[in-house]
Amino acid sequence: MHDPDLITRLLDAAKMHVPFDGWSEATLKAAASDADIDPGLVAAICPRGAVDLALAYHEAGDQAMLARLEAAELGDMRFRDRIAFAVRARLEAVEDKELVRRGMTLFSLPIYAADGARAIWQTCDRIWLALGDTSDDVNWYTKRATLSGVYGATVLYWLGDDSEDSARTWEFLDRRIEDVMQIEKFKAQARDNRLMSGLMAGPLGFLTRIRAPQGGATTGMPGRWNGPT
């Protein structure tokens, strides 16, 4: 298991270099030198080099978000406001936008695109779990996919937002969540619609057999399929 203290030291040392050199091997080497960490240890905690360092930075942001969510009083909030609070908490965990901007550049490269998508999906999964999501069917996927779209769009808007306290970003986020709530409203109406109910029981019945990932699954795929009974 990686030593969290070493990763923290490496990240703290890297932050001053990232705005100039990005999440690159040059940054990783400079951070290791500044933090006085042996190259062998660096290779152990970042076996793929700088991309692992960027992912560690994203992970640290997720953990800061979760700590804030755990400490917050969310009980009196509407559910849509809880989602907005969580996304805002994640962005406010960032001390320098340039660190995120450089990360977006890295994860836009084809070789690392899957890593970036996985990081965003994991962030959104953690938000749903922190807010008490217990879905175990196809909704597990649609919730995370939809929130990933909202989160990704909000990050891009936030990176270009120079308004005071990012006020325009939070307005943008509220509009995106309103769009999501309209989708959820449509899904609820569809469940009550006799035609759609018939489709779910017939041609689209396969959707009812999709299940969320289970602990210890060894299929290598996200989730599982329940065959016809």
Image: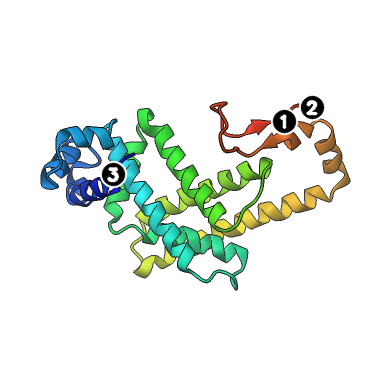
Q: Is residue 193 left or right of residue 210?
A: right
Q: Is residue 43 left or right of residue 63?
A: left
Query: Residue at label 1?
Result: 226
Q: Give the CA separation, mark 2 to mark 3.
A: 46 Å
* Closest to the observer, 168 or 59: 59
* Closest to the observer, 223 or 119: 223
Residue drawn at (62%, 53%) of the image: 133
Q: Position of residue 4 (x, y in %)?
A: 30, 47
Name the disc covering residue 168, or none.
none
User: In the image, which is nearer the foreground, mark 3 or mark 1?
Assistant: 3
Name the disc covering residue 228, or none.
2
Amino acid bearing label 2:
Pro
Q: Position of residue 170 (x, y in %)?
A: 46, 64
| Labels 2 and 3: the sequence-earlier one | 3
| Labels 3 and 1: the sequence-earlier one | 3
Amino acid bearing label 1:
Asn
Residue drawn at (79%, 33%) of the image: 205
User: Dot 3 lies on which element?
Assistant: loop
Q: Name the residue at the bottom extreme.
A: 76
Residue drawn at (50%, 50%) of the image: 126
Residue drawn at (61%, 48%) of the image: 143
User: Dot 2 lies on which element?
Assistant: loop
